[in-house]
Amino acid sequence: MQVGILGCGYVGLELARQLSEEHDLIGVRRSADGLAAVKAAGATAIKADVTDRTSLESIPDVDALVFAASSGGRGAAAAERVYVDGLRTVVEEFGERDTTPDRLIYTSSTGVYGDHGGDWVDEETPLSPTTDKTRVLAEAERIARELAPKYGIDGGVARFAGLYGPDRYRLDRYVNGPVTDGYLNMIHRDDAAGIVRFMLESTDEELLLAVDDEPVDKWSFADWLADACGVERPPKRTKPERLDDKGLSDAARRRILTSKRCSNDRVRELGYTFTYPTYREGYRAAIDDYRRGQ
């Protein structure tokens, strides 16, 4: 199978590493800076921009597409340009070719669920995005699942929980504190890529929630992490205490008020095996590095 990874960055590079032995890969970045990393991951590197249809013409026909492009952590307008306009452009470009892809996977976020008061959510839970950016992500999901099939492309969505892993452990945030109450839904980078690979190779499921076995409240996670690192447990604060901060942005305020626990029952039932089932396994390398540095 020939796979095009559009946005071959944090998760995309790991996906390339996992697929490289059995598939022909094309890794796409919008700047030349990361092309060497794409090649090192085992993919043919191409510079192209998902929002520029002319540049997409340089990408050859593929059997499957993974849309993992990033908006660069900027606001809702930038997110709309990449996730909505860019994804639509990709679907139209590849859908109008003589040879169209069989499959497209869009990597979304569990932020589209909004607030559920700490209750469990899964693939059947209706979406209720609460910010401009998560409303953009929900619209991009619609494009993947509704527009792509109009071109004969089987559109799917991998909905990622909070990503962590090499270069993204952020130990200091939890070890030093203060830590605000609330649930964490997480997935290690390797399993995020692994679930996308699973959707390409092993299932035609339209939507999968990519999250590990154990959502955890932040206070418990911070205490476990401090104990494992051999340091004092960090100071805590409640949500009302954090919300009293007059300098808090509206977006940060909405994030604090958003609470849910994400279930991975479906991906488990379909047969996916996690490399890092919980944060305990996933943070072990970071903890070992931290203790060696003390």
Image (cartoon, grey):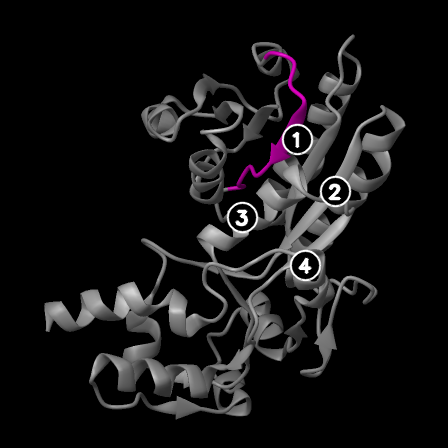
Image quarter for residue 240? bottom right
How far apart are labels 4 and 3 at the CA level? 11 Å
- The mark lying in front, picked from 1 and 4, is 4
- Residue 220 at x, y = what percent? 44, 87
- The mark lying in front, picked from 4 and 2, is 4
Q: Residue furthest right?
A: 150
Image quarter for residue 64? top right
Instruction: Give yes or no for contact between labels 1 and 4 (Cβ–Cβ under 8 Å).
Output: no
How far apart are labels 1 and 3 at the CA level? 24 Å
Q: Amino acid at mark 2?
A: Gly
Q: Is residue 67 magenta?
A: yes
Q: Secondary structure at mark 1?
A: helix
- The mark lying in front, picked from 1 and 2, is 2
State the mark number for residue 86. Answer: 1
Q: Residue at x 29, y 90 (%)?
A: 233
Point out the image quarter for the C terminus.
bottom left
Structural crowding at the residue carrying mark 4, measured as other residues with C-alpha within 10 Å and reported as few (<14), some (14–19) or many (≥20): many
Q: Magenta residues?
A: 60-71
How far apart are labels 1 and 2 at the CA level? 16 Å
Q: Secondary structure at mark 2?
A: strand
Point out the image quarter for the N terminus.
top right
Q: Which residue is mark 2?
A: 156
- Asked if residue 208 is positioned above or below residue 6 in the image, the reply reads below
Q: Which residue is mark 3?
A: 194
Would residue 289 appear left or right of 128 to someone viewing this image?
Answer: left
Q: Amino acid at mark 1?
A: Gly
Dominant secondary structure of the residues highlighted in magenta in the image? loop
Structural crowding at the residue carrying mark 3, measured as other residues with C-alpha within 10 Å and reported as few (<14), some (14–19) or many (≥20): many
Q: Which residue is mark 4?
A: 267
